[in-house]
Image: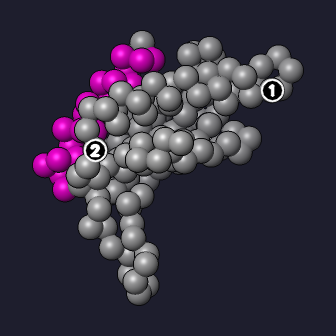
Amino acid sequence: MIAVIQRVSESSVKIEGKIKAEIGLGLMVLLGIEDADGQEDIDWLSKKIVNLRIFPDENEVMNRSLLDVDGEILLISQFTLHASTKKGNRPSYIKAAKPDVAIPLYEKMISALESELGKSIGTGEFGADMKVSLINDGPVTIVMDTKNKV
């Protein structure tokens, strides 16, 4: 699993012109799922996301987690994170999991994040044409890959 995590002051996702979900202070997470992903990836990544100390403390040092600031999460499925650009100019998405594999893992990630956070999270809609808006606070953007934990 690949996650692009952005600290936001606000974020939203629209589908067909209607807001599907919106959050205030928190994290907007783009999630790419591949065939090799499983429950171990979900467990590790959900804990990491919720506990990342990337929010400022009283001294403006990034020392607080999402839990510490009572923040929110907006999770968006993003198969293009697994794009291969090695050959030619048209990306290949061969590593990205097909919907029959990716959808159940995406739903398990939603549940895991809600469990870790202790509240519901906002989500996009798997496979939909989504318009995502955000105000990246900082800016702070972190990329995590469960296949490269070191």
For disc 1, the neighbor class at 10 Å (few under 14, some 14 to 19, many from 20) is few
Q: Position of residue 5 (x, y in %)?
A: 54, 42
User: Identity of the amino acid at label 1?
Assistant: Val
Q: Is residue 99 left or right of residue 118?
A: left
Residue at the spot of label 1: 61
* Residue extending furthest toward the right: 59
Local SS, label 1: loop
- How many discs mark residues in the rendered view? 2
In this rendering, the label closer to the viewer, 1 or 2:
2
Q: Position of residue 148 (x, y in %)?
A: 47, 47
Foreground residue among 133 and 83: 83
Residue shown at 19% from the left, 38% from the top = 104
* Residue extending furthest toward the left: 100
Q: Is residue 72 left or right of residue 96?
A: right
Residue at the spot of label 2: 37
Residue 7 image-quadrant placement: top right
Residue shown at 82% from the left, 17% from the top = 58
